[in-house]
Image (tube, grey):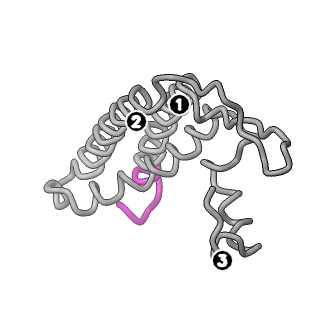
Amino acid sequence: MLETPVTSAPIVSNFLSNLPAYRTGVSPLLRGVEVGLAHGFFVAGPFIKLGPLRASDAAEVAGCLSGAGLILILTACLSIYGATAFQRDDVVGVKTLSGRAINRDPLQTSDGWASFTSGWLVGGLSGVAWCYILTQVLPYYS
C-alpha cells in the first residue's frame, strides 16, 4: 500500500486496517458477508423512501425487491471483475526491503475473490431481508 503522510498517521492507519477489505486475518468469505450486509441494508432504504412506489402500500416490498435486484447486479459485476483481474497468480513473492517475505492476502487470488463474491451475495441479500423485517416491525414505518 502506498504510504503518504496522511495514511501513515497512526489514527488513519489504525482506521484503515480495521476496514473489512484490509483485515487479512479474516477469510474472504466472511469479509464479503460483512461488506455485503452493510451494503444490502443501506441500499434498500433509498429504494423504499425515494422509489416510484413510495406513496403506496407496497413501498417496502418494492423497495426491498429493487435493492435485492441491485445486489444481484453488483454481484455479477464483482464476478466479472474477479474473472478479469485475477486470471493468473503471480509466482514472484513479495518481500520487504530487508528481504523478509510477506504473506499474500488470500483475497487477491481468483479463489479468494470468488469466495468474497459469494459472501457479498449472501450478505447483501441478508441485509436487504433484515431491512424489510425492520420496516415491518418498527413502528416508524406504520
Q: Residue at x 56, y 22 (%)?
A: 111
Residue kind at label 3, given as amino acid type: Pro
Residue farthest to the left, as pictured: 52
Image-based side of 84 in relation to 111, left or right: left
Q: Which is the main secondary structure of the residues drawn in magenta?
A: helix
Q: Position of residue 98 (x, y in %)?
A: 85, 49
- Residue 5's label in the rendered image is 3
User: Secondary structure beneath disc 2?
Assistant: helix
Label 3 or label 1, whichever comes before in sequence order: 3
Q: Is 79 located above or below residue 36 in the figure?
A: above
User: Between marks 3 and 1, how big is the CA–CA gap?
Assistant: 30 Å
Image-based side of 93 in relation to 28, left or right: right
Residue kind at label 2, given as amino acid type: Leu
* Quarter placement of the N terminus: bottom right
Label 2 or label 1, whichever comes before in sequence order: 2
Q: What segment is highlighted magenta in the picture? A: 134-142
User: Between marks 2 and 1, how big is the CA–CA gap?
Assistant: 8 Å
Find out whether residue 112 is within the magenta segment: no
